[in-house]
Amino acid sequence: MLDLINVSKTFFPGTLNEKKALNSINLHLDAGDFVTIIGSNGAGKSTLFNAIAGAFFIDSGAILLDKKNITMDADYKRAYDIGRLMQDPLKGTAPSMTIEENLALAYTRKAHKSLFAINRRDSEYFRKLLARLDLGLENRMKTKVGNLSGGQRQAITLLMCTISLPKLLLLDEHTAALDPAAAQKILKITRDMVAESKITTMMITHDIRSALAVGNRTIMMDEGEIILDIKGEVRSKMTIEELLTYYSRERKKQLTDDRILLA
Amino acid sequence: MTLLIGSMQLGLLYAIMALGIYITFRILNLPDLTVDGSFSLGMACAAVVTISGHPFLALFIAISAGALAGLTTGLLHTKLSIHPILAGILVMTGLYTVNLALMGGKANLSLVGSKTIFSAIESMTASPGGMGKTLLALLICIIVIAILAVSFKTRCGLAIRATGDNEEMVRLSSINANVSKCIGLSMGNACVALSGALICQYQMFSDVGSGSGMVIIGLASVIIGETVLGKHSVTTGLISAAFGSILYRIILAFALKIDMFPAYALKLISAVIVIAALSGPYIKASIQQNKIRREVNNYLANK
């Protein structure tokens, strides 16, 4: 579904601050894969997502989505087939618009042609989707999103990302800014949604336990490279301790992330 | 009474400009300074076409010219990534020359003797009290509000609103935010130019300098409207902007009538209104904070 071929990106080239953010990344994702990504601070996890989503153009290499070359496509064009969820729950929604209007905007790319953004058919569809979140939001469609909690906003953003059934879903630590209960809830909704819609998904997380428990494949990144890529039996037998030992043996240093969760 | 009717008429005609300002400043969240130029542009276009004997066509030409001016600002901002304020100032400055050229190099142009939409309605209704003019202004204002209110409910309109609210989210939804910005700026400036054209036909003259300070007058109207009617949805926002414009003209007329201010104080008053409205929330918060500070000090002193 997704192919990264020799993807490289260097920030501030030729200066003292030169940083090789992505170093010849090669990655192939099959349709329906759910990949979790872990790594220390500055490993290049978010940079990888930015490269795929088109926040910047890469220096060399190619990005193929469903065999289509998207390397030089503008970010909003790629967004047609790529859903992206940020860590900050404020980023994915328009606060002064209602829940219904936010969903209608996200649905625009795949909706039936209609003059008015809010119409009965779409509203029924949105209501059904909201009801499945089990947050009671289906009765608050006319509420402004700015009046909702971070968890509720993130749930709506998740819905907005998946409403148009993208080919690829990018989740960038999307539960990190939420309180533990909300984070659990959002993670559960994510798993259910991905399992049901079978969207190919990549999820960055700092929670190593959920990195191994969620999805079918785990990637570890460091200094712009993929240093571990496990799935199947190897992955199911992998423990957190083994993962950390592997990291320190491989890179001759400790896995450092001020927010990393080991338990 | 004459004073009130006169202010109502002016208020309704300037209301269309306030609607334009509402679109760019409030909905699109872009401080667009093209307005000063596009107002005069609407005037200049309307003057030339009205003199040639087509008062209705004049309005449509003004609308298209205004939209083009807005589009230019939009393209400078989105395609050449010039800061929106600077892009607006650049277009406004350039338009000064364009407006002079349109009016044949003259700084002002008189429409006396030409047929305007107002003289047409006067002769049709044959009402000397200016009732026809007021109703015509009201009708135009209602039509423009209705068109805008409906267009902001369409998919494109929703995208423009979302662009002003959270541009990143619009991009993530696979919508080109640059296009939304350009359309919004065109709509806003088309309204402003239409207002200029109407004022030109109303006053029977066009002046190249009459656009200066229009941004602030429009913004003052929007703020007054929001203070009185509140801000809920886009439709109420549009109505309150128009209402604010009428109120602004009435307040102004009475302030001038009782000789509180000389006539040339108009723009300073507008500026003060905007400053007061913008700084209001901050001043309120500071007063609140000072109160808490005093209470804490008292508490510690009594302990």
Image (cartoon, helix red, strand yellow):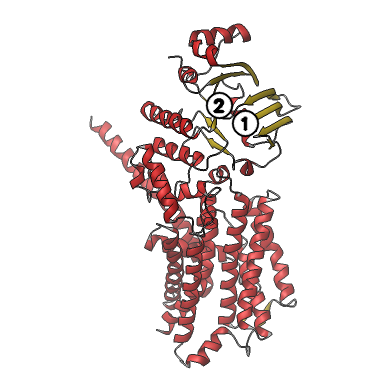
Pointer 2 chain: A
Q: Chain of mark 1?
A: A
Q: Position of residue B107 (x, y in %)?
A: 69, 76
Left or right: B214 with respect to B296? right
**First in sequence: mark 1 or mark 2?**
1
Q: Is residue B112 left or right of residue B80?
A: left
Q: Which residue is mark 2?
A: A33
Residue shown at 56% from the left, 72% from the top: B195
The label shown at residue A1 is 1
Which quadrant, please, contains the N terminus of chain A? top right
Image location of residue A185, percent across then percent down: 38, 30
Rate crowding at label 2 as few (under 14), some (14 to 19) or many (20 or more) other CA atoms within 10 Å.
many
* A165 vs B251, nearest the viewer: A165
Q: Under tag 2, what secondary structure?
A: loop
SS label for mark 1: loop
Task: Relative to B267, say whether B177 is above or below.
Answer: above
Place of residue A78 in the rendered image (x, y in percent of width and height, measured from the top left): 63, 40
Q: Is residue A40 left or right of residue A181?
A: right
Asked if disc 1 and disc 2 are in contact, CB closer than 8 Å, the reply is yes
At 55% from the left and 26% from the top, the residue drawn is: A33
For mark 1, does the 10 Å Cα neighbourhood hold few (<14), some (14 to 19), or many (20 or more) residues?
some
Is residue A99 shown to the viewer in this render?
Answer: no
Toward the left, the furthest residue is B302
Respond whether the residues carrying marks 1 and 2 are from the same subunit. Answer: yes
Instruction: Tell me the CA gap for discs 1 and 2.
Output: 9 Å
Total numbered labels placed on residues in the image? 2
> Between residues B53 and A105, which one lies in front from this camera angle?
A105
Position in image of residue A174 (x %, y %): 48, 31
